[in-house]
Image: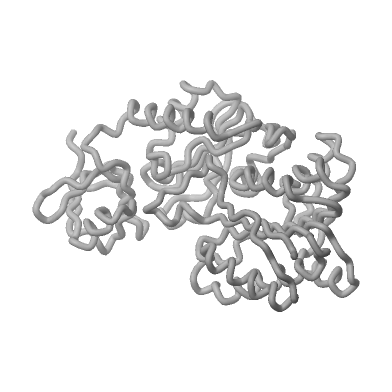
């Protein structure tokens, strides 16, 4: 059957011509006989073809562009996208078996995320379209990888915007929840059924390795989660102290330290804001401080509070650093662009009476490719700075 036709307003076609991949409901002129999750042909009011997209009947993002070409979106299309993604990861992923295999629009499959943890694949189908095709996607992933298990982590709140329920579970094979894989030459245990995101923050993998190249002496790692930054750096420094509010994360970090025979890293449950203040009041000093907080700015309305939060932790961290020390500071808030993060850290440095030199400006790992005309795919910022 031919795909349904959706006619766009001039503003809608203008978004596509500007390179964006999303069309909002208000930019649809007409969409007749279109079912939730359908592949549709996009046309302007003169009937000119603009590409193929997936339709959502519920989200304000009504159309997610798949391709600007008039080609079939079938098994062969998905196989081609998977193979292209594999070839790219083979070039950019080093010394790791935990990484992002498919990153939605960036890999030509909107709203589909697939992460690899060794022999286990974890997938997220975040729209009506990928949810509708979930069984086929599982079949194709099994066909290509023969994984031990395929797990779904469909618990992000974004699914609610698509009118989809939140759930997590095993779609194929066997998985008890804990799986092991390698990251930067270290062995980690990942809770793929209950951990953050799909089990870990894989987007920081390259930043952890970069930070370890500069880390030295005594290290304080705030918001340490399961020890990614801390344990990667521990191999090159005197000692590491990791702080996290989650008892489950702290226990996992301790297990990961034991798994790798690392004895110079300790982890404890605490509020990072409180610890930074306590150490500042006590005059405690470190050679390296790592800040990898959760997203303080979930939306534009929370920006002022988020800016205050980022400034506070950076100011406290700078006061703890010895001369010549290293600050690693991150933001995963899409609404905090790099320019604003630099401004916040600069203000903190002035208040702390510290001169800072930018050593590196980084973003998410290359297995999370950024689409130049889809700003939403660029969310992670990581600054490596030296106190002078």
Residue 37 occupies quadrant? top left
* Residue 271 placement (x, y as % from top left): 78, 64
Given residues 329 and 60, the one toward you in this image is 329
Given residues 88 and 117, the one toward you in this image is 88
Which residue is at a point 39% across and 32% down the rendered structure image? 81
Which residue is at a point 72% across and 60% down the rendered structure image? 386
Given residues 361 and 67, the one toward you in this image is 361
Q: Is residue 346 left or right of residue 65?
A: right
Quarter containing the C terminus:
bottom right
Does residue 33 appear in this view?
Answer: no
* Residue 185 placement (x, y as % from top left): 72, 33
Q: Is residue 211 left or right of residue 369?
A: right
Q: How many marks?
A: 0
Which residue is at a point 20% across and 47% down the rendered structure image? 50
In the image, residue 81 above or below residue 312:
above
* Residue 33 placement (x, y as % from top left): 19, 48
In the image, residue 264 above or below residue 272:
above
């Amino acid at each position: 059957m031919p795909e349904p036709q959706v006619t766009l307003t001039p503003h809608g076609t203008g978004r596509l011509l500007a390179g964006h991949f999303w069309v909002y409901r208000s930019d649809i002129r007409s969409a007749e006989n279109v079912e939730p999750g359908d592949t549709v042909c996009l046309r302007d009011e003169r009937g000119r073809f603009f590409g193929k997209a997936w339709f959502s009947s519920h989200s304000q993002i009504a159309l997610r562009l798949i391709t600007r070409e008039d080609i079939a979106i079938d098994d062969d299309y998905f196989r081609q996208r998977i193979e292209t993604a594999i070839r790219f990861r083979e070039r950019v992923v080093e010394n790791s078996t935990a990484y992002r295999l498919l990153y939605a629009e960036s890999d030509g499959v909107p709203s589909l995320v697939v992460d690899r943890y060794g022999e286990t694949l974890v997938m997220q189908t975040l729209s009506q379209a990928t949810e509708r095709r979930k069984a086929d996607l599982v079949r194709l992933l099994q066909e290509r990888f023969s994984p031990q298990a395929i797990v779904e982590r469909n618990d992000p709140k974004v699914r609610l915007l698509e009118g989809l329920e939140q759930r997590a579970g095993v779609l194929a094979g066997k998985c008890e929840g804990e799986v092991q894989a390698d990251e930067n030459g270290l062995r980690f245990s990942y809770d793929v059924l209950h951990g953050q995101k799909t089990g870990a923050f894989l987007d920081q993998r390259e930043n952890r390795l970069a930070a370890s190249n500069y880390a030295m002496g005594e290290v304080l790692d705030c918001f340490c989660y399961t020890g990614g930054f801390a344990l990667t750096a521990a191999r090159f420094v005197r000692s590491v102290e990791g702080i996290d509010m989650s008892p489950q994360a702290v226990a996992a970090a301790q297990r990961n330290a034991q798994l790798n025979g690392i004895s110079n890293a300790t982890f404890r449950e605490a509020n990072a804001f409180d610890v930074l203040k306590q150490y500042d009041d006590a005059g405690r000093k470190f050679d390296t401080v790592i800040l990898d907080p959760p997203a303080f700015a979930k939306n534009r309305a929370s920006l002022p509070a988020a800016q205050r939060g980022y400034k506070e932790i950076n100011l406290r961290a700078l006061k703890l650093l010895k001369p010549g020390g290293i600050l690693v500071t991150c933001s995963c808030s899409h609404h905090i662009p790099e320019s604003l993060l630099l401004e916040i850290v600069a203000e903190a440095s002035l208040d702390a009476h510290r001169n800072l030199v930018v050593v590196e400006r980084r973003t998410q790992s290359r297995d999370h490719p950024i689409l130049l005309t889809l700003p939403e795919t660029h969310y992670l910022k990581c600054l490596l700075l030296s106190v002078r």
